[in-house]
Image (cartoon, rainbow, N blue to C red):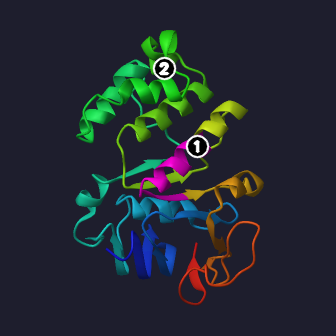
Amino acid sequence: MDSAVRLRAAVTLLGRFPALAGVDLDITPGEIVLLKGPNGAGKTTLLRLCAGLCSLASGQGWVLGHDLSKERRMVRRRVALLGHRTGLYDDLTVAENVAFWARAAGTGGADVGEAIERLSLAGRLADTRVGRLSAGQRRRASIASLVVRRPELWLLDEPHAGLDQQSRDTVDTLVRGAAAAGATVVLASHELERIQVLKPRVVSVVGGMVGAGSDPAGGSSGENASTGGDRRVS
């Protein structure tokens, strides 16, 4: 497989509005890619398209070799999206939620305890219903539920939001470990200085465009640029 994500003139509509309006993009397996841009630029829609949660109105797209126009359900089995919603069940405990997502992904329960431990949710918190957690604790539980699924493609929308410094460092360690193990990580964030430690390839999404001059965080544009000329994104 040459690309983990491959988009060609991809258009996605929100109602009649072209949230993605002709995007070309290639992401190779094992890359860490940062989507950089202002609110409303299309970053979240792009993540959702890669997760198989948005449909293509026109153009072509493949994620992990699956055609987005025909095989979105297959895509969902192999990727995980950390969005603004937790994806957790409030009436289940942290441990029950993490175990549920492990079973749903077919990975079994062997990693549940480790995921809970790594996100500092062991002990009393593991047996606490999610509906009683703080916002930061919920975010950590969501991340644990993602990690335990062992996705081949990590899609992270503002992954450090609501986390303390220790938890932010843990997220960075998990991202680096996933990429080193061969997974692909695509994240959207406004915290550019924070993300620099991950040394991602930067794809700029600004003013409805995916820029051709993307570059490594803190570096200069060049051979790490996203493919193609400027393509509109909203």
Closer mark to the observer between disc 2 and disc 1: 1
Q: Residue at x 54, y 31 (%)?
A: 140
Q: Could you tell me the amino acid type at mark 2?
A: Gly
Residue highlighted by disc 1: 173
Q: Position of residue 212 (x, y in %)?
A: 63, 84
For this orientation, the residue located farthest to the front is 180
In the foreground, 109 or 98:
109
Q: Could you tell me the amino acid type at mark 1?
A: Thr
Residue highlighted by disc 2: 131
Instruction: Specify whether 25 is left or right of 163.
Output: left
Q: Residue 44, which numbered label?
A: none
Q: Position of residue 232 (x, y in %)?
A: 57, 81
Q: Residue at x 30, y 70 (%)?
A: 68
Q: What stretch of residues is rendered in magenta?
A: 171-186
Secondary structure beneath disc 1? helix
Q: Residue at x 28, y 28 (%)?
A: 109
Task: Give the quarter of the figure containing the C terminus.
Answer: bottom right
Quick check: can you spot residue 110? yes
Quick check: can you spot residue 164? no
- Magenta region, main secondary structure: helix
Crowd band around label 2 with a 10 angstrom C-alpha radius: few (<14), some (14–19), many (20+): some
